[in-house]
Amino acid sequence: MSGLESRLAFSMLRGMTAEMARHIADCGFTAEGFLDADPSESSRVLGSNGRILYDRMAIDEARMAARREIEFIGNHHIRAFFLLDDDYPWNLREAPDAPVMLYELGDADLNATHAISFVGTRRPTAAGVEACSRMVADLGAYFPDMVVVSGLAYGIDATAHQAALDAGVPTVAVVAHGLHTIYPAPHRQLAASIVRHGGAILSEYPSGYTPYRQRFLERNRIIAGLSQATVVVESDVKGGAMSTANMAFSYSREVLAVPGRPCDPMSSGCNSLIRRNKAALVTNAADIMEALSWKPDDIPVDVASRNLFPELDGDCKAIYDALR
């Protein structure tokens, strides 16, 4: 069995988690060594109180599934990242519940210095779409190495991906299913464009896994974990974006939220995050840069100044224009 095949089989063992994988490694086992161990020994390592957690049948089934997956990822040029390997994304590795295996279609830099996620409602207002697009565009002008992370869903997710493409910066779409398909189907062209322009489609699920509600919630931790910060643009208090924001907060990552009118349900989640001191209030790229201490290099002063001070008017604007 090849090294990748054994890692795939290890990750496919039912119930295998990051905590278990790290514990097994701490006990001196490689993925292949654990698969080859006597079931009673592997169960003892996991402290199962005499219960056999993975018998020979379970391990053989995992090996067979891994062989099928090896063929699939080879045919479709997919990269696989194992939690305990050096090439696993650094930011995500720090999350206690990181996926044991990640699958990437594309070639995005998953260790980008400036990685930021944008999430929000599937039914945004025109103002929300404009705010998201403007922030991504402005940040992309300052940080060409930036990677925008989102979930390929309708609304703010798709807006963030498209804005990144328009700005010429790579974007990563984290999906809740195997890479044999794209959901939602109308976003297949968007997904293809993401991969074609240096981004990636990312999943923790092997091929054949279909999307359902729980998997969307599970994938939110990957969106949060890959990013140094999560920006919430319009969300109800119970929206999926709130799940991502809470995950980011639990990982001690920066959470930023665009405020809205008190009477607007699509801003109630953002306003709640700000009110409970779980998110910093942001309205533009300058606010995000200040919150994250991001400092652009080699940006002409007139361009930086023009974009960083969009609200100047009256005498202030006249003074600024004269100085420029």
Image: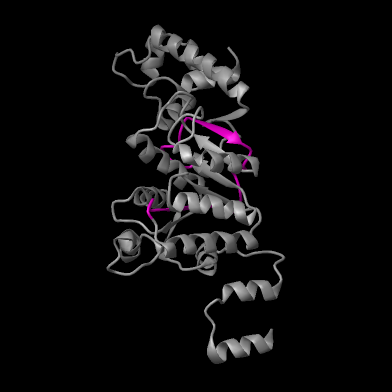
The answer to which quarter of the image holds residue 191 is: top right
Q: Is residue 120 left or right of residue 105?
A: left
Q: Position of residue 82 (x, y in %)?
A: 54, 29
Most foreground residue, 287 or 78: 78
The verdict on residue 179 being magenta is no
Image quadrant holding the C terminus, namely: bottom right
Most foreground residue, 234 or 272: 234
Q: Position of residue 314 (x, y in %)?
A: 54, 90
Which region shows up in magenta?
Answer: 94-123
Residue 115 visible in the shown view = no
Q: Identify the residue at horizontal 33%, vertical 64% (top origin).
A: 271
Q: Identify the residue at horizontal 61%, vertical 36% (top origin).
A: 106
Q: How is the image coloured?
A: one colour
Residue 202 visible in the shown view = yes
Q: In this picture, is 276 found above or below 94?
A: below
Q: Residue furthest bottom?
A: 315
Image quadrant holding the N terminus, namely: top right
Q: Position of residue 67 (x, y in %)?
A: 54, 14
Q: Is residue 71 left or right of residue 41?
A: right
Q: In this picture, is 58 found above or below 278?
A: above
Q: In this picture, is 300 found above or below 147?
A: below
The answer to which quarter of the image holds residue 200 is: top right
The answer to which quarter of the image holds residue 86 is: top right
Badge count: 0
Q: Main secondary structure of the magenta part?
A: loop
Q: Identify the residue at horizontal 60%, vertical 30% (top origin).
A: 79
Q: In this picture, is 20 found above or below 297?
A: above
Q: Is residue 191 left or right of residue 275?
A: right
